[in-house]
Amino acid sequence: MGFKKFIILFLINVLLFSTSLRAETEKECFEKVSRGIFKFNEGFDKAILKPLATGFNKLPEPIKNGTGNFTSNIGTLLTVPNHVLQGQWKLAGESSASFLINTTIGILGFSNPAEKMGFKNQQEDVGQTLGAYGFNAGCYFVLPILGPTTVRDSIGMFADSFVDPFAHVTIREHELLSISGNDIDYFSVKGASAIDFRAGNMTNLNSLEKNSLDIYAAYKSLYLQNRESKINNTFTTDGEDDWAEFNK
Amino acid sequence: MKKLINLLVLVTITLVSTNSFSYNSEPKIFIEELVGDAIKTLSDKNISKADKSKKIEIIALENVDINALGMYTLGGVRKTLDQETLKKYKELFQKYFLKSLTSRLTDYSENKFEITSADQKSETYTIVRSRIIKSSSQPEIKIDWRVYTKNPTEPLIRDLIVEGLSLAKTQKEEFSSILNSNNNDINILFLKLEEFINN
């Protein structure tokens, strides 16, 4: 069975055997399995990702910033169509301008002059677009290496490879504007992006690990809160409802 | 006369020490002064680790609504508990919270911090927005402080919202997960809290 067929079957199974797409987000698809995979991911982090991120943090500042800017600039290629799909024309324009400026003036995206010019570049994906269309997250589970997700976001992750022009010219081996690449290009960028994220969050993740009573639940909560704020494009939690009964 | 002087000195020391952690009641200045004080304490190389923790604990006890935070974190289960169990929970939560807060603040004490704005949401709470300035080991982090202002002269912190992620909510979901996977047995939560406090 090909990898693509396996992924499609896996997602269909998750959809059929989990709660419906509009079910409560907090619900787990298969908590015991997810906790097992989470442990495996912790081991992977300790053995591979964290040491790489620690080494990355020791690199000179321009190399670190350049890597972060480069991967983020390529990520903009996925952001633009998702802004369009969500009808966010102004943001789509800003992201497109950011990509063009950073790819040209910013030398292939290694520097980020667009930010200094005031162009925002927030990352968007198909999972967020589905969320914006009103699809609830469905149940929560953990994927090996890739980490926390939900039914909606895992479908989104799979769909990303069809929407993302960078995936088209690399893993799908299509030529776009005379540009082409291969699997190694795609996974190198994704890997660098993961290392950059892990390195940038070294203090946050160490602090979380030290101070959590149930680290699995803490990651789940943070993942779901993060996705919700990204879908609603609100980066502060102002919700008073949770606290209403304590205000008397 | 000597006794009177000694008494005066004692009274002065007591007054100074009890008022040393009272801050401006305007939420924005309140957070600015409080965080400045906490960072100053944690980065002071002349104070021992134990004394640092003690000072941070005093700051937190006076300026964080630990009781409400503890009840919020416990969720609906609190309504099913008797007074004695609730009292035990409050004691354990306070110890857990103070230890966890000191640890978290220590992790960020070397970073530069600035208040950006304040947004009064209602008569009872204001969101104070701040950020930890980007450094070589840390990207910029936005931190919002939920300040409870029902008593305008004594504002209290209820939550820290880091990049849109509420620490109180995360803590609540951790507690809820422990309770859910143990048939809502509060004693298991007590064990976990004691384990954390004693480690």
Image: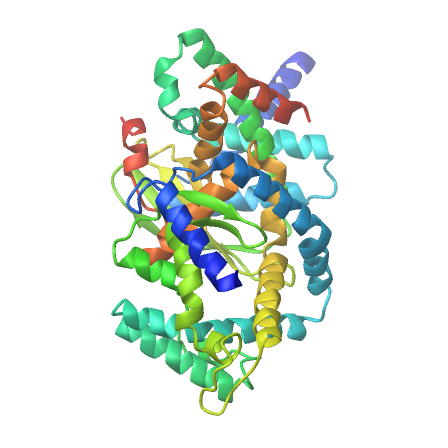
Q: Position of residue A138 (x, y in %)?
A: 35, 45
Which residue is found at the position 56% from the left and 26% from the top? B96
Q: Position of residue B131 (x, y in %)?
A: 48, 55
Nearest to the observer: residue B81 or residue B123: B81
Nearest to the observer: residue B150 or residue A217: A217
**Of all residues shown, which one is farthest toward the bottom?**
A178
Residue A126 quadrant: bottom left
Nearest to the observer: residue B14 or residue B65: B65
**Of all residues shown, which one is farthest toward the front?**
A1
Q: Quadrant of the C terminus of chain A?
A: top left
Nearest to the observer: residue B22 or residue B98: B98
Give the colour scheme shown: rainbow
A46 up-or-down from A120: above or below = above
Q: Position of residue A160 (x, y in %)?
A: 42, 66
Asked if residue B117 shows in the view, the reply is: no
Which residue is found at the position 44% from the left and 14% from the top? B86
Which residue is found at the position 29% from the left and 73% from the top? A84
Image-based side of A3 in relation to A78, left or right: right
Image-based side of A68 in relation to B143, left or right: right
Q: Position of residue B43 (x, y in %)?
A: 67, 46
The image shows a total of numbered marks equal to 0
Residue A131 quadrant: bottom left
Which residue is found at the position 62% from the left and 71% from the top? A188
B42 up-or-down from A156: above or below = above
Image-based side of B80 in relation to A53, left or right: left
Asked if residue B127 shows in the view, the reply is: yes
